Structures are given as C-alpha cells and as structure tokens.
Amino acid sequence: MIQYLYIHIPFCARKCIYCDFFSIPYDEGLALGYITTVVQELDLRKEAAGELKTVYIGGGTPTTVPTLSLIRLIKKIKDSFALSPDVEITIEANPGTIDQKKARALSDAGVNRFSVGVQSFNDYELKLLGRIHSFEDVIKTIAAVRYADVGNVSIDLMYGIPGQTMDGWRHNVEMAVELSPEHISAYELTPEKGTPLYEAMSRGELEKPPEEVILEMYYHAIDRFGESGYRHYEISNFGKPGFECRHNLNYWNRGQYIGLGAGAHSFIGDRRMRNTDDVKRYIEIVKTDSLAIDESVEISCEEAIRESILLGLRRTEGLNIRGCREDLGIDLEPAARELIAKRLLESSGGYLRLTREGIVVSNTVITELFQKLTL
Amino acid sequence: MPKNIRNFSIIAHIDHGKSTLADRLLEYTGALSSREMMEQVLDSMDLERERGITIKAHAVRLNYAAEDGQEYVLNLIDTPGHVDFSYEVSRSLASCEGALLIVDATQGVEAQTVANTYLAMEHNLEIIPVINKIDLPASEPERVKEQIEDIVGIESSDAILASAKEGIGTREILEAIVRKIPPPGGDAANPLKALLFDSWFDNYQGVIVLVRVFDGTVSSGMKIRIMSSGKDFDVSQVGIFTPKMQPVEELSAGEVGYIIGGIKSVSDTKIGDTITDAHRPAAEPCPGYKEIKPMVFSGLYPTETHQYEGLKDALEKLRLNDSSFSHEPETSTALGFGFRCGFLGLLHMEIIKERLEREFGLSLISTAPTVIYRVTDAKGNVIFVDNPTTLPAGFLMIEEPFVKVTIFVPQSYIGSILDLCQEKRGTQKEFAYVGKDRLMVVYEIPLNEILWDFYDRLKSLSKGYASMDYEFVGYIESDLIRLDILLNGEPVDALSLIVHRDKAYYKGRQIAEKLREVIPRQLYEVVIQAAIGSKIIARESVKALRKDVLAKCYGGDITRKRKLLEKQKEGKRRMKQVGRIEVPQEAFLSVLKVK
C-alpha cells in the first residue's frame, strides 16, 4: 500500500524566468473548480493507498488558492485516508502569498511543514528571477509562519544567478543561517530549454557566474550549513537532525507515491504515470470519473536498477551495498573500484556514496557506474 | 548459334542513366514486365541502390526479335561504375564484343566517360554512342556529339538519340546492337576456355561464378579446373540469368552464364581467371588475368573489446563474398586487438565498413586510411609499410604511390581546381581545352592526397560540374615523415600518420585543434600534442570537467533524469578508452579532416 501522497496545484501569480514546471496564471473560478476535481480524483486513487506517512502540496504556488479551498482539500484527505500519527504534511508557500492568518488556518487544518520559496534575500536577484516578492516579504512570511506555531519550516535558496557574486551568495547563506529554518534546499539555477532565462542566455543577454565560482558557492553552502547544525543529506538538501524531508526521501529511496492534479506524476506498482498538464482537460476527464493519465510507462528491471542507483547516490548516506546485492542483484563493489580509486566514490559502513569531489560530477560518476555494471 | 549472339556492356559516367537504360532494355525485350520490374533491377544490393552505384557485375540474357526477322540472344554484362573497381570493369569488357557508350545530353563527356571508353577501346570493342536524356530541355545533343568526336575520338554522326526515362530510342539501340556488334567467335569443339568475370557466395548454393565461354562447352557433371590455381571442381549446374536464375543444358562458345560447382569460397574464383575442362585443358588461359591488390589500408577495431571475435567472424564471412579485400590481425596499444584491412579504394572501404556495422551489428573504429609506402630501410632492404606505426626510424628512402588524375571542368572553375591539385602536391601533366568552355587537366598526385576529401572538394569547388577519374602510375620518392599524436604525453599509435615534411607543422596544429573540438571534457585535463620524433610541434588542451550534476530530482523528474543519464552513458559507450582518456570514434578520422 502506498504511503506517500503528492498534490499538484498548478497556479502561480506570475511565472518566474527559470521555471519549466507546469503552471498557469491564477484564476479564482478555475482554481475552485480545480480543487473540487482533485478531490474527485482522490476518490479514484484512494484504494491504492495505505496509512499515509506524508502529504505534500506543491506547485505552482498552492497558497494562491483561497484558504477555505485548501482547508477543504486537507480535510478531505484526512477523511479519506488513515494518517500515520507522525504524518508530515507540507505545503509550498511563496512569500507574498501568505499572511499570519492564512498560515494559522492551514496549521490548524493539519499542515505541519511549510516550504517557503525564498530563492534569494537580495531584491535585485529576486527581481531578475521574476519573483513577485521582495526581501521584506521574505522576512514577513517567515515571521507569519513562525507566529502560526509551525515548527518545521524549509526555505529554498538559489545560487548561480546571473550577476551573483561569491560575496552576494555568502550574504544569502548568512541570512539563512540567521533565520534558522529547520530545513534548507539550495539549488543551482539551471536554465532549462524553453524558459525565458534560457532564451536570454542564448542571446547573450544574461550570463551565469563562471563554473569555478558556482562550485565555490556550492562548497560554501555545504561547509557553512554543516557547521551551523544542518545535515547535508541530499545533493541539494540540508536539514537539522530529524527534519529531513520525509516526503522527498521517499523519492530518493525509489518508493511509490500517488500524485494528484494536473501534471502530477505517480509511481504505482512498476509504472510511472503522468497526468495531463492541461488543467481544463484534466477537469473534464476527471469529472467523468476517469483518470487523466497522459503517459504511463512500465519500468523494466534494468531501468529500475538504474533509477535506484541514480536516486540512491543523491543521498549522502549513499547506496546500501548489501541491499543492492540482495534486492537488485547487482554487485556494486567491483563496479565502483575504479571510481573509488579516483576518490569520486567512497565505501564505508556498508554504504557506497559520492565523495566531496564526486558529488559535483555525479552525472559522470553515475554513468560510469552504469557502464561498469553494463546497465 | 553464335552468329545470333551479341555480348555487350553499357559504359557511362555516373548518373548518365546506365541503370535506367538497362531497365528499358529488359522491359522492351520482355525479360521482365514493367509490373514485375523494380527500378534498377540489376543493382540488387541495398547499398548499391542507396548509393546509386553498381558494385557487382551481373549478366542478363535478353531475347530479341530483330527487324531482319531473326531471333537474337543479347547478353547484357553490367559493369561497376566506380574507379575502385576498374579491374572488374576491364574483365567485364573483356567478355564482350561491343559496348553502348551512354553520354548525358545535358552534361556531355565526363572523366569516367573517357576512362571507360579507353578501356573499351583497349579491348577492341565496337562502341555504339548513345546520347541520353534528350527529353530534357537543357539537352544539347549536337554539342555532345562533337565532344564525343573531339575528346574520345569516336565517330558519332549516327549516335542514337535516346531518353531511357521516356523509353525513346530503345528499339534503335537494340537494332544497333544486332547490326553493329560482331557475333562472338570461338569454337565449341575446342577445349573449354571460359573467362570468369564475377563471382559471389550464395548461402544455399555456394559460390556462383559468371563466365563468358570463349571456346568449348560447359555442362553439369563436368570436372572443371581453375587455371591459375589448378583447383578442380565438379559442375553441378550451369545456367543463365533472365534475370532470374534459369538452369540450361550447357553453355557453349560465345555464351554468357553461370556455373555452380561446390566451390566454398570466392577466394578460389578470382575475377579474370580462366575456367577450363580438367580432363582436356586449354593450352592458354584468357589474357589479362592479374591478382588485384588492395590499395588503401585502414585498421578496424571493435569499440568494445569483447566484439573482437564477432568482427573476426564477420570479416571472414564477408571475404567469402569479396576476395578483393584483405584482413590481418593487428594490435594497437591504443585500440587493442583489431585488423589491418586492405581495400581497392575508399568507396570499397566505406562499403565494407558499412556492411560490417549494418549486417553484423558491430560498432567499429576505423583508423585513418593509408596507402602502402615502399621503404628502403637503413640496411638497404625494401619493405612495404601499410601502417604509419611500422615505419622504421632511420630509413634511406621512402616512396609513395602516385596516380594520374584526369579532371574535366568548366573554365570558370579552373582556378580553384588548379589550386586544389597544387595543395594536394600534384604535378600538372596536361592542360587542354575541350570544346569552347571546358578544360581537361591531368595531374600526377600522390594517392594518399586524394584518399579523403579530394573528390568532395572537387565537386564543391566546381558546384558539382567537375568530374574525375584516376589510374595508378607507380611509386615515386617523396620527403615523408611520421607525425605522432600524444594524449597526456602518451603517443596514440592509431592517430599516427605519414605526411609530407612541408605539411607536417600545419597538419600537426590542425589535428590538435580538431581533436580539442571532438574530445569531450573529462574528469582530468587532456593535453593533446603533435610531435615529429621527440619534437613537439603543437599543443592543445581540453579543460577538466569540474561540474556535472543535476541540481534537483523529485517525483516528476525521475524518468527524465534517468533518460538523460542513459543518453550520456550511450555516448560514453561509443567512445574508446585510450589509457584513462575517452576518445570518440570520430577522433580517429579527424586526422583526415584537415587540409
């Protein structure tokens, strides 16, 4: 039985220049109809679920949706599924879309983890990224969430922003440490094809900082967050002990999950599925009590092994060598020998993991491992 | 009845319409109805069809009721249309008494027209000029007639005007074959003497040989002898192509057909050999037999070492069908175990490589093709070197093969063509106007220089208007040295090449730059150097890959990221590990892609 539930809310006040997620401008009528439809889809999927360990409401910007609708959705989840006593219920909240009242209402409804899309503490960078909020909004939002007695707050930060300097990044890192959230995700800005950022970079209008600087930024985050009491538990994620995101850990453990909403992905049995990302079509189809799946692919045995490796190595804990042998039938040690000799991988305590040098070239390491295992 | 037999070939420059005309003749004589006829039936291999080049010769018997009221048997002997196979062409022509010379009415005489016509004249063939494509608005039959007379010296006032595509002139051509080409001579009572002009391996029947019988008869049950080797075989079947295979009682003097006789390998049936009766052998073989030797050599290596056995099997299987290429095991420090393969020419090399990859599913790396050098070593011994790495250090003299290249080109492009020949170390031998605005130039050029891009550049410099042909002239001494390429200080033998001293510096720099472009960034810096002996003449480097990581990977990203990494892995799979450096296949050919 599946114990992890994801709900996608595809609405945003405005699209950021780097965003390649599916999202559309907020429209109240559509949003209300959408939530009703998600509730309907939930009924279609609930049989596959057992007692839920995590619920994650992501987007888009879920907090653009009126509070009452969100509460109705959370209530429906609580009524439909058994929840584990220590269930983790996360909502993504962007600064400028949530105040103390809304935070309190969501918290009362059962949300116990807020993931705040801060990205930067620098107004110039925020503007360049196309965010709707300012530094002041960030501080107000975090305060609002704290006042609502939310004990588990995560923030997202971005490095490698055009124009960003090492000093600028250090400042952002210090601000984050100062605010002391329970969890920090730090990502390198990635220009994905088709985004305005990508176009602007192709035209030469924007340029990311040099590779050496970006590497220094990444290592600085690892070191500074590390000494401030955060555990670097995944390539881009840091948490105070006990505050690792359990929902996301399930992805990296290659666990199953149910995804509801337009554009949401599910992993059920041995199939990975994707719902249509066309909101109107999604609503039309689900209204007829059918699933709105656009793509459903069976994962072969070999693909499953490759997934386990590429996901498992994202965790700093690494891959359990015995587990891989017993569950996947692969012998990691001989395959990894050369990479260990090159100090890109290390093996200790029965786990194989990326080293500090290996983590920044993890794609190369993983593909070499695939090759050695003739996968 | 030999007097009602006519044996002929069609000779033409590429694309002048040879295959289409062959189709028309088959159709007109009812050998195949247009409904059953696939286009260009004579070119049966896939590769031939795709490239539009006839590689293997075939022979088809046509029955024709002529205007004189008599029935004639016309044997159309097809010839390969590429200079790599000129020996095969000559053997096909030796099997005929006449030839149709096809010239495109819009293009006029081209280099291969001349080369093939001379070849036909050497065999004393009756040549019937046919001006094709007269249906095209740009056709200039009168001008082309003049060219045929001026350039190749053939009376062409009564050249047949035809359009193979439209079926114009087909009957006139057939009539001309009957009237102008002499019937074959020979005597069926003499001992058997048959010229072997093609052979191939068939999975069910073993080797099938195509012959032109000059004397005597051959029939099933006979014991035949291959004259060059003295090997005997029992004939199990003789027959003709209509173009379908059709067994007959016997083939006798003047006739063309096939023989099957439990022959296991085409290496026993070399083109140009003579087949005779083992019990009553002919006194003399047919003239002109020679063992053809490969001209161009290249190392072929499996990308993945475990495919070595597969490559070996594949080469052996291909050789069953094509005795004109050779393969010897070879070891490279960079590439591991592979084979040094010899080919008739570049096209032949490409065909073999493509067949190995396509038909046998192999992934191959080929080293830069090279010619055979004649080297006099320090002790005065003459050795032949087909691999740059085996060039001895101190030698007295090195000679390289030269070819005579004949080029036809419109006057307006002559400047750039002369520059090209100059750049390729050519020496001008002839320079003559043909007609008002076209030129024929003849150069002697090292074969090595025209191996790679010469033809392509000739075509692009002349907007496609220039044509060329070449023939081997002999070995000439040259100032050649070995250029080595080093990756991170280690010489990579598979990248070495023999170059002229004057070009070594320029080439070394160009190759290093090219390699910098094609070698992907790796975890370590890759230093590329070009060296002559111990002297480094060029240096480039590929910066180390420092960052290659996916920032995030959540539920919706997993499939996409997996595919991305799988693609990255596939890219790696096609690379060759040289020391600890990964070198892509194209790097081994990049040494050629510099001027």
Image (cartoon, rainbow, N blue to C red):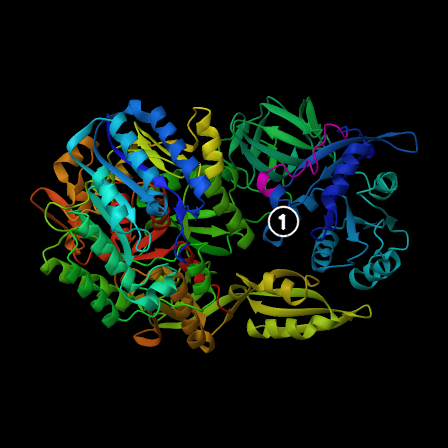
**Relative to B127, residue B220 above or below:** above
* Res A215 visible: yes
Extreme residue toward the right, this view? B68
| Quadrant in the picture for the N terminus of chain B | top right
Q: Which residues are magenta?
A: B34-48
User: Would you identify the image quadrant in which residue A276 lies?
Assistant: top left
Q: Nearer the viewer, residue B579 or A96?
A: A96
Q: Is residue B37 magenta?
A: yes
Protein chain holding label 1: B
| Residue B304 image point, x, y percent | 33, 45
* Res B525 visible: no
Q: Nearer the viewer, residue A48 or B239?
A: A48
Residue at point 53%, 54% (across, down):
B346
User: Would you identify the image quadrant in which residue B35 lies?
Assistant: top right
Please state if B73 lies on the left or on the right of A21 as rendered. Answer: right
| Residue B173 image point, x, y percent | 85, 42
Please state if A330 lies on the left or on the right of B466 as rendered. Answer: left
| Residue B375 image point, x, y percent | 42, 67
> What is the total number of numbered labels drawn onto the structure image?
1
**Relative to A184, residue B223 above or below:** above
Element marked by disc 1: loop
Please state if B209 lies on the left or on the right of A69 as rendered. Answer: right
**Relative to A162, residue A14 above or below:** above
Extreme residue toward the front, this view? A101
**Relative to B540, residue B189 above or below:** above
| Residue B97 image point, x, y percent | 76, 43
User: Would you identify the image quadrant in which residue A90 lies?
Assistant: top left
User: According to the image, label 1 marks what residue?
Assistant: B288
> Type of residue at label 1?
Gly
Please state if B569 lies on the left or on the right of B3 as rendered. Answer: left
Magenta segment main secondary structure = loop
Mark 1: few, some, or many residues within 10 Å (few <14, many ≥20)? few
